[in-house]
Amino acid sequence: MTPPDLWRLSLENLWRTKLRSVLTTLGVVIGIGALVSMVSFGVGMQENVTSEFRENDLFTSMQVLPAKIDVGEIMAGGFEPPQTVKALNDSAVEAIRAIPAVELAFPEIRFPVTVRMMGKEARTSLQAVPAAMGRYKPFSEIPYGSFYASELVPISVDSLIGREVEIVSSTLDLQSAARAFMRSFTAPSRLPLREEVVRLRVVGVRGRLSGFGAARFRGGVIVPIETGAAMPRLGFSDVWDLLDSSEGTQGYGSVYVRTRGMDDITPVREAVEEMGFGVLAVIDELEEIKQTFLIMDALLGAVGTIALIVAALGIINTMVTSILERTREIGVMKAVGGSETDIRWIFFLEAATIGFIGGAFGLALGWAVTRIANVVANHYLRPQGVPEVDLFYMPVWLIAGALVFSVGVSLLAGFYPASRAARVDPVQALRHD
Amino acid sequence: MTPFVLTRDLCKTYQKGTVPIPVLQGVSLEVAKGEYVSVVGRSGSGKSTLLNLLGGLDTATSGRIVVGDSDVTSMSRQDLAVHRRSTVGMIFQSFNLIPSRTALENITLALAFGGYPRSDRRRRASELLSSVGLEHRLSHTPGELSGGEAQRVAIARALANAPDVLLADEPTGNLDSKTAEEIVGLLVALNSERGLTVVMVSHDEATAREVSHRVFRLLDGRVIDELSGRADG
């Protein structure tokens, strides 16, 4: 028999037992649907996080620290302060800027502030960023107003833009600190902090930060670097400041370095480390992040696979039943010249057809589930201030892979029934009753 | 006489649990091309087993079968399938048509196994059905056919791939005497008009002697007698 004949025969057989074929296929539909939506969720998470990293230029940037440190060691709790710490001061920043392929390097200045405006106030953090960063994400896309074009804050007119805000930072009030120290034995005291007020003008309002937490520039207020550096504040507000203060030298807690491209990260980091500084680059963690997502995908996939295994058992069950019913028919096919190979293929193709159709509809189901889940999830996330996000992602490899997997599993499920059908003894099958 | 179908010391033993049950115990017979022979005997004498072995549905325990130029006993399972589809055609007491397929489709299935091009199958199948007098029953399923009509469809199917030998296992066992006569008449006509070699298994010795050239009588898996039949041929 030719392959098209065998396939036609399988389709006829499936069509003859419509209800059973549909129910069996439905099992595969649900299995593949579960698998696809689960993996699509995992892939979606990964996609969202990596695109977030890309948005924030994390693959072309690094953080320079006063000392070489091992993040893993800190995480493990076995961190010992480094013995020698080099001052990360202006001349160090200049030296870093001089490294080829370094596009930008500036000290990271970040501290908590209170913002007062139109009679309201809010606590947030302030970050000083040079005007040059306006060329790059996320500052290149300011939805309202504009990023400051120079280190001087311009004045513009708009409802919110152009208004004056009061930025209130805190400094240590030595007098009240001394008083507090004296009183602390008798009564609880207020923190010995003094308010320092700086008035600035709003030039632009950035969009909302997404919920995936990869943003490096989380400050609620972004100010030009000179402005930020000049603002009075507490001596340290960053963990890296603690490292720096260990030698008592004047310097910054950390320096942000942006390279021209992703490939420049390695040479630049080597040059910086040569200078005796430590470097943290997100790109290092990318492999680790990828691995984490791989495990997550595998776990999600495993749940879907269980559903598919159940469906495969359904296929085996259906086909074994069908062989019992069709024993005589198989005998007839053998008597008129059907070979074992022919018979095996007929049943194999039945299984493959169930797998293919089940896979195709399963993909459709999986897609529908992800769309509905996305709408529902966003509906609940929106009131919590999380911007609209697509939680699922269905790349081509997932679509093709699901189909191949579905057909593959079905063929595997069809293997035993098909061999059994091929082995039917025609003499037994045709014995008249 | 040069034999077209030949068996030599053919033995078949079934295993029932650990107990061997000998069904054929050294059957040797020869059938010439164009001959109509019958095998008669009581039930359990091994006559159907003999036919299944000739048809390649079953394999012998020992002995030899030659059909045409081919040694059936040394064939692989794939070769046996080829033997079944092209060298022999089989009909059975219970017709063994596929109930879900129409008369025409039962035959096109056999043609498909025989490697007939798809475009030719329906035409060939309806010709075959016409040749057995069923041109008006093409799209009926076996359930809608009488016993005689069903057996005619089975005969047409057996002839689909132009076999050299027709093997008939009690072809009239499920039919009333009038229909039985018609079916046997059809087999005789196929034998005498087309020169088709026919081996028929029957328990009706009288009819067998009437229509066959020779009749082998089987008892307990052995040929105990060879009787002469009709005079022509």
Image (tube, helix red, strand yellow):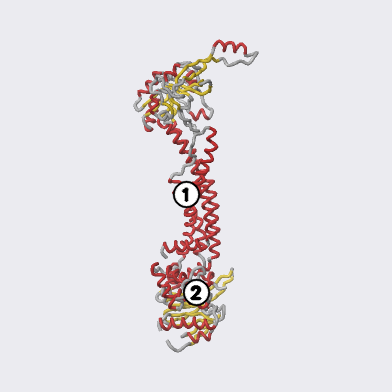
In the displayed orientation, state which residue is furthest to the left: A100
Q: How far from the left and from the top, in percent, is residue B231?
A: 45, 89
Residue B52 bears which disc, if any? 2
Mark 2 neighbour density, 10 Å: few (under 14) some (14–19) many (20 or more):
many
Q: Are marks 2 and 1 in contact (CB under 8 Å)?
A: no
Q: Nearer the viewer, mark 2 or mark 1?
A: 1
Q: How far from the left and from the top, in percent, is residue B171?
A: 51, 78
Separation (CA) of disc 2 from disc 1:
47 Å
What residue appears at the point 48 percent right and 30 percent down from the top-left corner?
A208
Which residue in the protein does label 1 denote?
Answer: A402
| Residue type at the position of mark 1 | Ala
Q: Which of the 4 image quadrants contains residue A144?
A: top left
What residue appears at the point 48 percent right and 32 percent down from the top-left corner?
A210
Q: Which of the 4 image quadrants contains residue B112?
A: bottom left
Element assignment for label 1 = helix
Residue A113 seen anywhere in this rendered image of the structure: no
Quarter in which the C terminus of chain A is drawn: bottom right
Q: In the image shown, does B216 or A222 lie closer to the viewer?
A: A222
Q: How far from the left and from the top, in percent, is residue A91?
A: 39, 18
Mark 1 neighbour density, 10 Å: few (under 14) some (14–19) many (20 or more):
many
* Left or right placement of residue A229 versus residue B217 in this view: left
Element assignment for label 2 = helix
The vertical placement of A127 against A433, above or below, is above
What residue appears at the point 46 percent right and 81 percent down from the top-left corner?
B187
Q: How far from the left and from the top, in percent, is residue B65?
A: 45, 75
